[in-house]
Amino acid sequence: MNTPADGTAEHAHTTAWIASVLRTRIAAGELTPGSKLSEEPLCAALGVSRNTLRQAFTTLVSESIVTRIPNRGVFVASPGVDEVREIYRVRRMIEPAAVLWGELTPQVLEGLETIVQRAQQARDSGSVPAMADANQALHGAVVALTGSASLQELMDRVLAEMRLVFHSMASAPDFHSHYVDRNVALVKRLRAGERQEAAEGLRAYLDEAEAELLVHLGAEQDRRSGMRQRAG
Amino acid sequence: MNTPADGTAEHAHTTAWIASVLRTRIAAGELTPGSKLSEEPLCAALGVSRNTLRQAFTTLVSESIVTRIPNRGVFVASPGVDEVREIYRVRRMIEPAAVLWGELTPQVLEGLETIVQRAQQARDSGSVPAMADANQALHGAVVALTGSASLQELMDRVLAEMRLVFHSMASAPDFHSHYVDRNVALVKRLRAGERQEAAEGLRAYLDEAEAELLVHLGAEQDRRSGMRQRAG
DNA sequence: AATCCAAGATTGTTCAACAATATTGACGAA
DNA sequence: TTCGTCAATATTGTTGAACAATCTTGGATT
């Protein structure tokens, strides 16, 4: 039956619980982009009924973590070129806006600096995942400058989608190391109160990152179609 | 093979249909903020089962059109002071950002001017609802400058919440007429390519609108609590 | 009037079924 | 072989009834 980890799952929480489990597994790369989430096996595996699983699905669909094709099923989202473009359209708007018009308290500045230091340490120790984490944390913290929960939520969704993009790339190249310095410069400018310059630099940064990511993604798709040709 | 040419695949759409019906009724003010959406009566009225209605609920919850209180039910959202503040936090970020960095084609500019003209006509003919519509259309069109579907979606949600705010005010004062001219000025500056000034003016506009709306809302809440005191 | 408690009502979840659509695999024709 | 056709099968979408957990209501007691 329903075996909640420690009995915390009281009445009225299992749907959210299931959604959270799937969210975590997808974020961890345990469920890879494009893979199908069939209802009956998942119901059996999670110990819930189809109805509650389907309800969890609809929340995940609304978060665009998962894609539902009518009468076909739901699949782990596998963002492609278009989705990456959309991701950067969003980031190019809200991140510089946060830099320009967000509330910059000394506390928050300190938090940003802590994060860039973490990124530098990660680069020094050569840990790509730690660098990716620190990078995402930094840009999330930038959006937090807006003070808006909705924008923060949107950014969280976008960053989750970015993780999916990385998961869908077989070869995860060192995508972050050259951006650590730009993050350092960003925080430096923020500390100096040069918001205009910070915003412009951030926009340039995002343009470059998008371009590089699209190149990697295009190569990935070529590789994949090449394999398909070879196989068929 | 299935021929989706005319057959609208009746099978897989009732959940979305129900969600859309409720969305429309709420937007029209037919279901007022704070009112409870009981499951059984609604199921009977809409002719669907509880399970599908509940699925529609979860999508509406994710759109924050509706609030779910565990074991108590779902209610039409009734935005208060905090929600209004959050609305304007969002608008103060993404609207000026769209003005500063959006893509300004002559086509789009023409669309904006058409909308402000509509607003002016509405003011001349004294139609408050038409003015409100035109105002929302204009600000939606501004966000459309970003080219981002996600931001557009967020803005749509925000504007829907604004409608709920107006619906929750018993006395709907002429909130829009003094802002028509500012919208005219905004479009004028955009046409002149003065984005910086347009963005700053827009931010000032949003500050004022928020302040005025909060005054009205505070008065409304005072009125309501006063009635409660008188009644109890 | 205030508090407590049991009966009723409502929500959260499960189960079993059926309808509609998709997928599969076998079969036959060019 | 290779391609389409078609029936058999599997999966999704929706329904209705049931039960457990929680909230609400009304009255009894003090």
Image (cartoon, coloured by chain):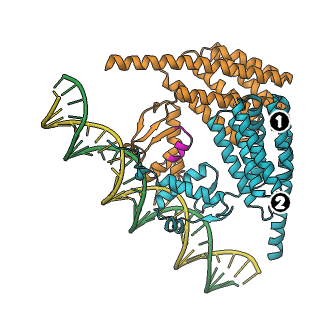
Chain colours: A orange, B cyan, C yellow, D green
Q: Position of residue B79 (x, y in %)?
A: 73, 55
Q: Position of residue A97 (x, y in %)?
A: 76, 31
Q: Neighbour class for label 1 at 10 Å: few (<14), some, many (≥20)?
A: some
Q: Quadrant of residue B124?
A: bottom right
Q: Residue at x 68, y 51 (%)?
A: B160
Q: Quadrant of residue C4?
A: bottom right
The residue lying toward the viewer, choosing from A189 and B177, is: B177
The residue lying toward the viewer, choosing from B95 and A112, is: B95
Horizontal arrangement in the rendering, residue A183 relative to residue A85 (left or right): right
Q: Which residue is mark 2?
A: B173
Q: Is residue B41 visible?
A: yes
The residue lying toward the viewer, choosing from B4 and A197, is: B4
Q: Position of residue A9 (x, y in %)?
A: 53, 51
Q: Main secondary structure of the magenta part?
A: helix
Horizontal arrangement in the rendering, residue A214 relative to residue B220 (left or right): left
Amino acid carrying label 1: it is Lys
Give the residues drawn in magenta, as a range.
A58-65
Instruction: Please tell me whether mark 2 sits on a helix, a strand or a loop.
Output: loop
Is residue A209 depicted above or below A69 in this figure? above
Horizontal arrangement in the rendering, residue A156 relative to residue A36 (left or right): right
Q: Residue at x 53, y 33 (%)?
A: A27
Image mark 1: chain: B
Mark 1 or 2, which is nearer the eye? Answer: 1
Instruction: Please tell me whether mark 1 sits on a helix, a strand or a loop.
Output: helix
Image mark 2: chain: B
Q: Which residue is mark 1?
A: B188
Q: Which mark is residue A59?
A: none
Horizontal arrangement in the rendering, residue B129 relative to residue D28 (left or right): right
Q: Neighbour class for label 2 at 10 Å: few (<14), some, many (≥20)?
A: few
